[in-house]
Image: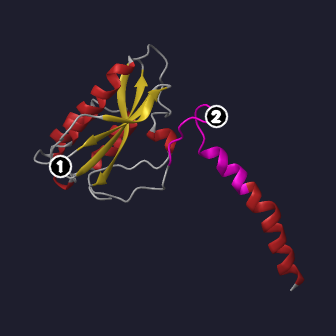
């Protein structure tokens, strides 16, 4: 009985504060007082999308070799829009769909897209221009692109002077 009390005291005085200190550093980025992106946890699985729940990957920070020239920030949004246009094509066969999106992605993400069946995509057309949901800086950014059934989220990274897609997610309308 005394051991149970000792365990509870140890958990409340050591483990929980340590966990809180560790986690508090996981969600900070940028200068103090700056806008911090919030990660509400893993996105629900939706056929035809690849969800990325880790903020660094979602914001274009990945393990790709990104040494080399830098891409102009103004070209990040058009890169996201090009991916969205290639992505929202449910009437095409899987091989043709993959060929259209592969050239716009980092190799690791393109490999993940091999399992997507375009017939199961949650949207069939893009209805507006990309809007930055996270500022394009430090070689990465994220854009929200409206579709006929929700919002396509596209993360891009500056890889060797070219903006490439590192991940995407989809939020259905009304979510």
Left or right, residue 61 beside residue 13: left
Q: Crowding at label 2, few (<14), some or many (≥20) Cα neighbours within 10 Å? A: few
- Residue placed at 31% from the left, 28% from the top? 77
Total marks shown come to 2
- Residue placed at 45% from the left, 56% from the top? 42
Left or right, residue 109 beside residue 40: left
Answer whether residue 99 is visible to the viewer in this image: no
Name which quarter of the figure residue 101 lies in: top left
Give the vertical position of 10 relative to 68 (above or below): below
Name which quarter of the figure residue 142 lies in: top left
Which mark, by number, is residue 50?
Answer: none
The colour scheme of the drawn protein is secondary structure
| Residue 40 drawn at (x, y percent) | 48, 54
Mark 2 or mark 1: which comes first in sequence? 2
Where disc 2 sits, the SS reads loop
Magenta segment includes 30: yes
Range of residues picked out in magenta: 19-38
Between circles 2 and 1, the one closer to the viewer is: 2
| Residue 17 drawn at (x, y percent) | 76, 57
Which mark, by number, is residue 148?
Answer: 1
- Residue placed at 59% from the left, 45% from the top? 27
């Amino acid at each position: 009985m005394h051991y149970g009390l000792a365990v509870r005291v140890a958990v409340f005085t050591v483990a929980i504060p340590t966990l809180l200190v560790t986690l508090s550093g996981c969600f900070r980025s940028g200068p103090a007082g700056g806008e911090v992106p919030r990660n509400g946890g893993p996105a629900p699985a939706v056929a035809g999308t690849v969800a990325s729940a880790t903020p660094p990957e979602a914001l274009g920070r990945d393990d790709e070799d990104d040494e080399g020239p830098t891409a102009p920030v103004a070209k990040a949004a058009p890169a996201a829009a090009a991916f969205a246009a290639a992505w929202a094509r449910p009437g095409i066969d899987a091989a043709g769909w993959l060929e259209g999106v592969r050239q716009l992605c980092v190799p690791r993400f393109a490999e993940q897209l091999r399992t997507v069946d375009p017939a199961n995509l949650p949207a069939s057309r893009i209805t507006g221009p990309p809007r930055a949901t996270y500022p394009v800086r430090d070689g990465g950014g994220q854009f929200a692109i409206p579709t006929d059934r929700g919002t396509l989220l596209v993360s891009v990274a500056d890889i060797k002077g070219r903006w490439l897609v590192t991940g995407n997610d989809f939020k259905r309308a009304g979510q």
